[in-house]
Every structure is written in structure tokens, then in C-alpha cells.
Image (tube, grey):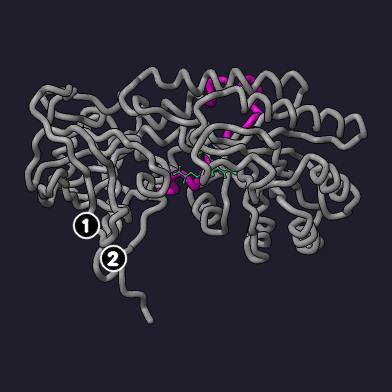
Amino acid sequence: MSFSHQNDQWYCEHVPLKAIAAEAGTPVYIYSRQMIRKRANAYLDQLTDPSDLICYATKANSSPAILQELSAMGLGADVTSGGELYLSLKAGYDPQKIIYSGVGKRDDEIAMALEAGIRALHIESTAELQAVETLAAKIPNGVSIGVRVNPNVAAETHPYISTGMHEHKFGVTIQEGWQLILAAARSPHLVPMGLAAHIGSQIEQVPPFGEAARLLTDMGTKLRAGRIMIDYIDVGGGLGINKRSWSDPNDVVHIQAWMDEVYPTVKEKSFRFTAEPGRSIVGPTGCLVTKVVFNKPRENKRFLIVDAGMNDLIRPTLYKAEHPIVSVMGARNLEIGEEGEIVDVVGPICESGDYLAKDRLLPPLERGDLLAVMNAGAYGFAMSSNYNGRLRAAEVMVDGDSWRVIRPRETYEDLWPSI
Ligand code: LLP
């Protein structure tokens, strides 16, 4: 079950998008529970060892209902802030299944993680190791850490979301990684447990991930030979989705291919396996439904002005990301030559960069018609803001033929803090 076209309109599972928009209003993020489960299971089904862990990268979408769904399925969480840690604990993740990555952990965030007893903090600099060691002195039995190595593996993606090269701020070099692991092993307060990497996001080819997995596994094997008992290898997240992922029930083959590339490398050397996927679990499972406010022709151009803007979905303007868009009450496919209009789909924000799509062929649409922006389950709501005084959208979860609001639309009162 996914997004499908039936009876001349688009559905999420068995529920027409139009029915949800009519009741919940627009803009609204709509997620398919069955798709979320299917994609998470595509990872879980490949694990042959119960101590292996898929830590969902909560930054992709930290809506409480989604966090709860994935924690109930047995996934762990990859968090990157005190806020994400708070949400993950509240959503019921076993602290021993939570890892904390991020280049700029503050003392209060480190202390919070130590107090919660999470599985490991992933260290990204010498200064961070020192900060963690100081705070760890108060914790009996020592604190587990991993080191995030920046493997210098190039992978094709947008420069803003490529992370695995030495020019990026993330992780440490393999040599520095050795130093950090050795320093942790010498410390009475730290236990070096894991080696991690994350080479970037929205990477569609799998070989670079295999390369990173081999580098980490080799390093872990050498450390073990020196009696430093590295327990797990964390190959990170970053697997991309494609333009068809949202409507293709077989799209999980990419997840299987990715696991085939990285999992055996890690297991052959008897490490516990960990991964941190975000987008590949939730990306295709959500869409943003928005209403046409005006159809505005200009010289040589036609703008469809809709009620969702860059404050709701910043990816098109920030990364030139191309999200497929369908007319909720339109035909399944609109081929060139049929009646249609080439339009820029733009939002109401006072910025020329406020667009959701450029030069798209859509059927002629009028005020009140609905569009669905697909592949919007990851880094959609999570990156939304109140810019221009706009209220953040509602979120809805569909399950079979029923649906529920999992986050109410903000109200004007929410814009005014208690001061
Ligand atoms: N682990 C770490 C340490 C990360 O930094 C990230 C993403 C992930 C895991 C999950 O990566 P994923 O599987 O979702 O690709 N806002 C951008 C994406 C930024 C990703 C940042 N880190 C976008 O909208 O494309």
C-alpha cells in the first residue's frame, strides 16, 4: 500500500487525499503508516543477528507518532541534539538503542545523554573527547563512545549534503580516529565501543557505502588485534530515494541492495552492525498537500501560487531538489501534448526563491484545486519554520482506510511566546 491513483484521484492507502484536505485543511503533510513499516522492515528483515541495530535518523522526521511507530518496531534512534534525544526517550526508544552524533554537542546535551544511559556518543573531535571525559568522570562504570571517522569517500550528491570528505566539518581522519580510540582506551572513564561514518545524504549509488564499510571494518579489525575490543561498526545513513520511490511498491529493492553492500562486510568480521538511515525509511512515505490560491499568468510564465511555501518545504530552493507533484483530482499521467500548462509552483512567501517546482507540466488548475508534493516525508516538516508569520502545517497519519491528525496545525496564538 502506498500512494496510488484510483477513481480519477490520488489516494494514500485507502483514503482519498482530497477527503483529508477537506477536513484537516491545507497545507498538510500526509504519511502512510504501512509504507513507513514496509521500508523500516526492509532494513530489519536483512539482519541475522539480534544485536544488530538500525538507528532511525530522527532528524529526517521527528514527529512523535513516527518516532513511536519506529521505536515500537524495535528500531533504535540516531539523535543529533538534546531536543531529538528528549523526543526519542519520550517516544519509548530503549536508551541502549540510542546513539548521539553531531559536531557541536554542548555540555548540557552531553550530560543529558550520559544521564539517560544511551548506547554511545559518537565523538567528532579531540576537544569533544575531552569534554565527554570530564563529564563521564561522574558516571560509574564508564561511558561508551564511538568515533565518527570521515573516510574521505566521494559520493555524488548536492554539496550541502555531502559530508564524507576531509574538507567537511564532520568526523575525524582515520589517523585522528586511532588517536581518539587509544585515548579513550587509556581513560578510566571511557569505553571505546564503535566506529562510525556517514558519507552524505541522498546518495543513490551503493558502492561508496561499501567502501566506507570496508574502511571502518579494517580499522576495527586492526584495533582488535591491538586488544581494543571494538564492538560495533556503524555505516551511517545516506541512501537516496528517486523520483518514483513514492509510488513504487517495489522501491525497497534499493534498501536491500544497500544492505547487501554493507552488511556482509561488517558481519564477516563479527562486529555488531549499526546503520543510521533517515530519508530511505520515511522520505517516500509522506506528501505535502497544498491548495492553489491563485493561477497567475505573467509574460512568458505562469505561476501557480499555492498555500505551502519554502517555510513548509525548503528542499527545492535550498538544494534544487525536484519533488514530483500531482494534481490530487487529476489524471495519473500527463503527457506533453495533452491539455496542460507549464507552470512554476510557488508559495506565498516574500522571496523570489520561494518555489516548490519550476517549469512543471500540470493540468490547468484554478483557485481551490489541490496539489500533492511527493517524496516529502523526510526533511519536509522537520525543516519547516514560521517565516513570514506562517503557521506550521498539520500532519496526518493514514492507516488502511482510517487516518488521524498526529500534529495539529499551529494557531496564531502559537506565534506569541509567553513573555
Ligand atoms: N547520520 C548522520 C550522522 C547524519 O548526519 C544524517 C543526515 C543521517 C544519519 C541520515 O541521513 P539520511 O539517511 O537521511 O540521508 N536536509 C537534507 C539532508 C541532510 C542530512 C543530514 N544528515 C535534505 O533535505 O536533503
- Which numbered dot is residue 348? 1
Left or right, 10 with respect to 284, comes to left
Q: Quadrant of the C terminus?
A: bottom left
Query: Please, what secondary structure does the residue beneath circle 2 have?
Result: helix
Amino acid carrying mark 2 in the image: Asn
Boundaries of the magenta span: 43-63
| Residue annotated with mark 2 | 388
The picture quadrant where one finds residue 319 is top left
Residue at image location 51% in from the left, 46% down from the top: 160
Query: Please, what secondary structure does the residue beneath circle 1 have?
Result: loop
Q: Is residue 150 above or below residue 5?
A: below
Percent x, y for residue 146? Answer: 73, 44
Q: Confirm or reject: label 1 Cβ below 8 Å from ligand 1.
A: no
Residue at image location 72% in from the left, 41% down from the top: 149
- Which numbered dot is residue 161? none
Foreground: 150 or 195? 150
Percent x, y for residue 230? Answer: 80, 35
Residue at image location 53% in from the left, 43% down from the top: 159
Estimate how packed mark 1 is, as few (under 14), some (14 to 19) or many (20 or more) residues with alpha carbons within 10 Å: some
Contact (Cβ within 8 Å) of mark 1 with mark 2: yes
